[in-house]
Image: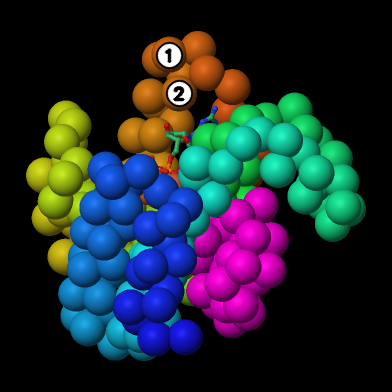
Amino acid sequence: MTRDELLAKIQTQLKPARFAHVQRVEATAVRLAAKYGVDQEKASIAGLVHDYAKQRPDQDFIDAIKANQLDPDLLNWNNAIWHGVVGPVFIKAELHIYDEEILDAVRYHTTGNRFMTPLAQIIYMADYIEPGRDFDGVEQARLLTDQDLALAVAYQTKHTLAYLIANNQPVYPKTLATYNAWVPQSQ
Ligand code: DGI
Ligand code: FE
Ligand code: FE
Ligand code: FE
């Protein structure tokens, strides 16, 4: 599939604002890949597909979790978690992308993971700092991402966890595992 064909398929799944976001994540991820010696084509594809499943009905995810015998605890969560963790089911079936490093970058883009390849770290950060993002701390996150990817991953993970706790949100266990793996050792 060419990039234009991939873009056209993604566009059918996403509203315009979300489609614009994934293209900014792609551009940010390709830039970071060049800087950090990561495969730029993988960064492009992972950036474009990371939110592919973001606007699907909940029932699609419930069906996919059952049909693929994924962790039944996933049924206790929602789209915020599903679109990353379960998204690769749809990316494989509909976009025919099977590269496990790309699929892992999608799986980990929301919660992070104990182990993340440089590609997964880049997608995690590109999603957080793409030029359309505007929140307290985003400038610091942008500076850190250009200086030290691991410190940037730790920064995002800490701030996301603090945000969830401040807002009485449930913390997905993998988000906490990401915190434990990346934050204490970053000091
Ligand atoms: O899909 P995006 O909006 O580009 O960004 P994302 O996939 O990084 O985040 C989606 C949402 O998930 C965002 O509102 C933060 C939220 N989130 C991240 N970790 C957790 C979480 N929500 C809950 N409840 N628990 C988590 O551990
Ligand atoms: Fe997302
Ligand atoms: Fe994110
Ligand atoms: Fe995103």
Which secondary structure, mark 1? Answer: loop
**164 to 116, vertically: above or below:** above
Q: Which residue is mark 1?
A: 167
Task: Kindly indicate the quadrant of the structure image that contains residue 5.
Answer: bottom left
Q: Position of residue 9 (x, y in %)?
A: 45, 66
Magenta region, residue range: 86-114
On screen, residue 92 versus residue 165, left or right, reads: right
Q: Position of residue 118 (x, y in %)?
A: 41, 74
On screen, residue 80 versus residue 138, left or right, reads: right
Q: Residue at x 16, y 65 (%)?
A: 146
Task: State whether residue 90 appears in this view.
Answer: yes
**92 to 64, vertically: above or below:** below
Rounded to the nearest angstrom, the CA distance separating label 2 from label 1 is: 5 Å
Name the kind of residue labelled 2 in the image.
Leu
Q: Residue at x 34, y 34 (%)?
A: 159
On screen, residue 24 versus residue 4, left or right, reads: left
**92 in the magenta segment:** yes
Q: Is mark 2 within 8 Å of ligand 1?
A: yes
Q: Which mark is residue 164?
A: 2
